[in-house]
Each structure stands twice: as structure tokens, then as C-alpha cells.
Image: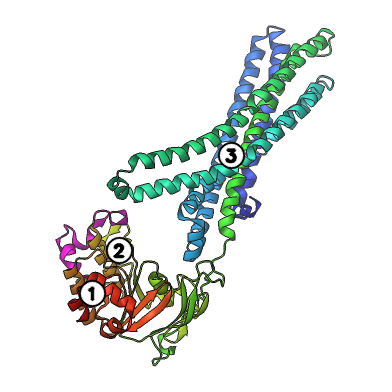
């Protein structure tokens, strides 16, 4: 937790004055038993009603001033804790956005969501309690003990005997409960993962009538979390009764031995009541301390998980250098792979997803990439915008290694349409402008025309201002794909990458899309990744991948004759006459 304390530097006033106000409240609280003692020893003993009323008013004034101090502390604690949480959450979100695909894949989306929400909320509570109670509770324990010693040193020995027993209970309970708190957050990750999978894949679950199985899966995970929480709850529940037994035993001892000292004239009845009040204050404060231990144990586990994210450094670093277009070599290929090998394990092992890839793609070319499932097609195109770094070899854009570009300048050259059509909640225009913030309506219309999306967008009630639900849930699969293609085209990129992004389109729309791309983007380098032979058949060059290796390159006619795998793919989709055209 100490590594996150730097965020409290922005709230120095709240951290200093908050506990100070709480300390003043505690001082007034320690004075109250002495006033009560005087009421009993003077007012009640002498039947002096005016004195009782006067001292009663003093108690009310002390209580009111204490309330003002307490509310002030509450306000400062809320301001500091919420500000702390906001700053940590913002920095964590910014840090997560610096991760490459590798780090996000490694930690998991559901775990990151839990850490940026539940774990940081736990830390916010800890900061609030730090300001409100960390100073007050120990001060009351020490102050009440000191006041009791001032009243009668011998009777205060009861306090000194009871305190070590309470401390022993705290230590035992904390040692037993700490391991459980560390596992609870991990189990929350699992619940979030299952919930997220089910909500995103609800149509698949229902299509296969797997609701009962998924409910059982969720219930098992939820029950596992509940059992862990109940276990730690049972252990933590021992704190209050055990401390109460010890402290109530101490109160009985005070009444017993105090009664003897009253009989001998050493103490008064009012002082005995003051002793009992001080013991009650110690009891309540120790319970607060016990609960603080539980709270800070949870916060410590959460802090470790948050720090774990901050400690992870992206395997891909941004150069923050803008390479001017004029400085690139106009004679060089638009894209070049030089002996590229790639492993998802990030070390040079034999387990390569791509191996010894060498390709040259020139400006204005349309390249088709085809191969079986898992052959490395998407991995290959993901290396161009530098979502991953190569394990061996180089990827060059306009003759310059992609590692020399800043992310902004590299990705400004490209329009990428991923396999899964991802749209965001907002209007059609909002989604299209992700490709170019300053896009005009004319630019958007042109992009929609090329992507074959104008027809359905123009029929929408609000056209470009029509709201799209999160994930594009109110659109069909084909409509989503066409909008994502249009989004990539809005910025008029030099390189357009279509990663199996026409799979939901009918053949007629697919043909119209390819014709429009050929006509309207003649200077654009287009890379089409597809399982459909018809989608890449007319490309200037076709690359055939198998198990991460290139097994054939060339135009359709030559490849059909020379590459057995390509011929096999063609004949699985087309008859022999169509395949030979």
C-alpha cells in the first residue's frame, strides 16, 4: 500500500486536518466521563438540580462541538478518498492502455475490470478509514487508559491486564483471516469472467439450450466465493464477542475492586462510573481497531493486485517520434516482412505462430491472404500496426522498421477492420469518426458508399445521428461489418487491412464491396484476409499460409496449378470449372 501513498500528496490538507479534527472530537469524548463523575458526586449527591442541569448542558455542548468536528473530518476523508480513488483509477486506465495485446491477453480482461473497480473501491474505503479512525481509535485507547490512571493508579491495573489479552485475540484472528482475503479477489475475477462470457455469448448459450449448465457453472463459482467469505466471516466474527468478553470481565473487575475502594473512601461513586465509561470507550475503540485490521488486510490484498498492474511494463514501447512522409523511401515496398518469425510466448522458442516470413507488398497492390484455421493469417496482419512485436526479423512500412515509428504516425497510415466487428455506443457518425475525428459528412458518405453501407444507413430514422447500442446489438452482423469497413475508410488510409471482415456479407454485397474498393482505392494498398476464395481470387498477389509458413504466392491461376493446398481450398468451395477461371 505504501507505493500508492504518493497519490495522497495531492490531499495533504485533508490528510493532516482530517485526523486533527477527529482527535479533537476524541478529546471531548474523554472529558465527558469526568463531567458525568461530577454530576454524580456533586449534583446527585447534594440533590443540586441546577448543577445537574448546568453540567448536562456542558455535556450537550461538548457533544455538539464533537459532532461538528466529526462531520468536518468526514467531509475531508470523503474528499481525499474519492480523489485518491479517481487518480489511481485514471492512472491505471492510462497504464492499461499502454499495454500491448500480449499483456492484456496475459492478465485477462475480467481481472483488469475487477482491479480497476472493486480493488480500487476497497482502497478508497481504506483511505477514508485511515483519516477518520486510525488516529482516533488508538488515541482513545491510550487516552482512556491515561485518564483512568490519573483517577486511580491501582484500579487502572485492570486495564493493563485486559489489553494484552485483547491484542492476542487480534493477532490470532488476523493471521487466520489474511490468506482468505487474498483469494477472495481472485474468485471475484472468476465470477466476472463467467458473467462477461455469458452476457456476451447469451445468443450462443440459448441456441444450444445450455442455460442450466451455465447457471450451474455460475452457481458453483459463486458458492465457492460464498464459502470463502463465510469462512473468513466466521473467523472475523470472533473478534467482537471475544473482545467483549474480555472487556466486560474487566468492567466486572472494576466494579468489584472499585466498590472496595469506594467503601474505603479512596474513590467516589462518580469516579467508578467514569472508570466504567473509560473501559467502555476502550472496548469500542479496540473493536474499531479490530475492524480496521480486517479492512486494511483487504486493502493490502487489493493494493498488491493494483500494484501488480502498475509494475507490468508493456513489451512494446512507443518511440514518440513522428516520421515525416517525405523522409520515407518512395521506391521501397509499402510493406515488407524480412525473415519474420513470431511466438506468442515472447521468447525465441520453437513454438512459432509464424516462421521465416518474407514478403514485399507495393503501393496500390491488393493482396489476398488465405489458409486454414490457425495458419497465422490474423497474426501476420497484426504485426503490421505493431499490435505485437516480431520475435525474429523485421516488419518495414515505407522502408522503415515499424519499431521506429510512433504508434500514432504508424497507425495513421492504416485502416484496420478486425475479425470481430466492434462498434461503440453512440451515433453512426461517432463510430465513423473514430477513423478520422474531422471527417465531414461527404467523407463519411463516400466511405459508406464504398463499404456498401449507404443503403441501410440512409434508411435509418436519424441517418448519421442514429444511436447504436453497445457492441452494435441493434444491427445485423453484415451491417456491423460494413460500418467497421466504412470506419476504416473514412480516414483515407494508405494501407487497408480487412481481416476476414466480409464473412457476414452475402456474395453479391461482397462482390460489390471488392469492385468499389478496386475502383475508389486504386492508390491504396489493400490486404484482404479471408477464408473465401472468391474474396481474394482477383487480388494482384495471393499468399497461402499453412501452420505459420508461406506455402505459396502468386496470382490465382498460377497458384491453382502450383500450390496443392490452395487448389484443395478452391475445390472445397468451387467446382473445377469455377476454380480454373
Task: Say which residue label 1 marks.
Answer: 534
Residue 88 locus on image (x, y percent): 54, 54
At x 19%, y 66%, the residue is 506
- Is 451 placed above or below 120 here? below
Colour mapping: rainbow
N-terminal of the pair, mark 2 or mark 3, is: 3
Residue 275 locus on image (x, y percent): 74, 19
> Is residue 271 in view from this perspective?
yes
In the displayed structure, does residue 451 sit left or right of residue 66? left
Depth check, mark 1 against mark 3: the one in front is 1
Residue 33 locus on image (x, y percent): 69, 21
What segment is highlighted magenta in the picture?
450-474
Say the numbered circle drawn on residue 73: 3
- Label 2 and label 1: CA atoms lie apart by 29 Å
Residue 148 locus on image (x, y percent): 77, 24
Q: Is residue 10 magenta?
A: no
Label 1: element kind: helix
Q: Residues within 10 Å of mark 2 (few under 14, many from 20)?
A: many
Hey, which quadrant is residue 466 in on the image?
bottom left
In the displayed structure, does residue 385 sit left or right of residue 514? right
Hey, which quadrant is residue 546 in on the image?
bottom left
At x 59%, y 49%, the residue is 303
Task: Say which residue label 2 marks.
Answer: 431
Amino acid at each position: 500500500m505504501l507505493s500508492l501513498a504518493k497519490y495522497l500528496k495531492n490531499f495533504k490538507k485533508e490528510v493532516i486536518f482530517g485526523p486533527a479534527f477527529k482527535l479533537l472530537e476524541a478529546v471531548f469524548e474523554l472529558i465527558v466521563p469526568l463531567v458525568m463523575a461530577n454530576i454524580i458526586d456533586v449534583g446527585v449527591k447534594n440533590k443540586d438540580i441546577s448543577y445537574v442541569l448546568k453540567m448536562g448542558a456542558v455535556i450537550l455542548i461538548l457533544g455538539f462541538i464533537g459532532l461538528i468536528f466529526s462531520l468536518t473530518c468526514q467531509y475531508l476523508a470523503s474528499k481525499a478518498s474519492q480523489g485518491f480513488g479517481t487518480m489511481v483509477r485514471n492512472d491505471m486506465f492510462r497504464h492499461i492502455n499502454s499495454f500491448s495485446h500480449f499483456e492484456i491477453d496475459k492478465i485477462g480482461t475480467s481481472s483488469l475490470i475487477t482491479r480497476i473497480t472493486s480493488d480500487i473501491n476497497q482502497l478508497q474505503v481504506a483511505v477514508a478509514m485511515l483519516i477518520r479512525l486510525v488516529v482516533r481509535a488508538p488515541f482513545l485507547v491510550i487516552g482512556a487508559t491515561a485518564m483512568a490512571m490519573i483517577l486511580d493508579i491501582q484500579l487502572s491495573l485492570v486495564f493493563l491486564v485486559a489489553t494484552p489479552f485483547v491484542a492476542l485475540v487480534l493477532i490470532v484472528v488476523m493471521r487466520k483471516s489474511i490468506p482468505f482475503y487474498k483469494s477472495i479477489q481472485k474468485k471475484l475475477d472468476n465470477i466476472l469472467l463467467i458473467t462477461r462470457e455469458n452476457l456476451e455469448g447469451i445468443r450462443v448459450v440459448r441456441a444450444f439450450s445450455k442455460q442450466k449448465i451455465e447457471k450451474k457453472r455460475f452457481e458453483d463459482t459463486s458458492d465457492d466465493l460464498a464459502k470463502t467469505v463465510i469462512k473468513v466471516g466466521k473467523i472475523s466474527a470472533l473478534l467482537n464477542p471475544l473482545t467483549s468478553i474480555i472487556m466486560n470481565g474487566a468492567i466486572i473487575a472494576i466494579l468489584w475492586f472499585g466498590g472496595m475502594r469506594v467503601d474505603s473512601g479512596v474513590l467516589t461513586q462518580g469516579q467508578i462510573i467514569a472508570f466504567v465509561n473509560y473501559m467502555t470507550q476502550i472496548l469500542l475503540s479496540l473493536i474499531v481497531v479490530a475492524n480496521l485490521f480486517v479492512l486494511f488486510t483487504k486493502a493490502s490484498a487489493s493494493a498488491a493486485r493494483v500494484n501488480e498492474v502498475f509494475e507490468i511494463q508493456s513489451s512494446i514501447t512507443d518511440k514518440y517520434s513522428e516520421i515525416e512522409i517525405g523522409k520515407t523511401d518512395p521506391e521501397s515496398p509499402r510493406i515488407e516482412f524480412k525473415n519474420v518469425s513470431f511466438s506468442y510466448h515472447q521468447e525465441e522458442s520453437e513454438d512459432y505462430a509464424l516462421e521465416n516470413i518474407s514478403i514485399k507488398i507495393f503501393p496500390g497492390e491488393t493482396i489476398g491472404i488465405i489458409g486454414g484455421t490457425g495458419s497465422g493469417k490474423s497474426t501476420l496482419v497484426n504485426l503490421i500496426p505493431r499490435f505485437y512485436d516480431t520475435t525474429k526479423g523485421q516488419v518495414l512500412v515505407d522502408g522503415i522498421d515499424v519499431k521506429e515509428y510512433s504508434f500514432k504516425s504508424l497507425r495513421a497510415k492504416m485502416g484496420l477492420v478486425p475479425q470481430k466487428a466492434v462498434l461503440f455506443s453512440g451515433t453512426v457518425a461517432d463510430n465513423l469518426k473514430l477513423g478520422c475525428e474531422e471527417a465531414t459528412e461527404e467523407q463519411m458518405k463516400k466511405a459508406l458508399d464504398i463499404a456498401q453501407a449507404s443503403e441501410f444507413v440512409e434508411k435509418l430514422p436519424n441517418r448519421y445521428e442514429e444511436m447504436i447500442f453497445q457492441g452494435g446489438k441493434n444491427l445485423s452482423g453484415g451491417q456491423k461489418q460494413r460500418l467497421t469497413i466504412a470506419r476504416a475508410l473514412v480516414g483515407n488510409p494508405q494501407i487497408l487491412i480487412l481481416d476476414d471482415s466480409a464473412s457476414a456479407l452475402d456474395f453479391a454485397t461482397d462482390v460489390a464491396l471488392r469492385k468499389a474498393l478496386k475502383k475508389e482505392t486504386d492508390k491504396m494498398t489493400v490486404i484482404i484476409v479471408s477464408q473465401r476464395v472468391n474474396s481474394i481470387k482477383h487480388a494482384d498477389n495471393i499468399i497461402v499460409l499453412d501452420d505459420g509458413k508461406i506455402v505459396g504466392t502468386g496470382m490465382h491461376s498460377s497458384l491453382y496449378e502450383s500450390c496443392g493446398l490452395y487448389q484443395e481450398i478452391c475445390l472445397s468451395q468451387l467446382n473445377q470449372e469455377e476454380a480454373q477461371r
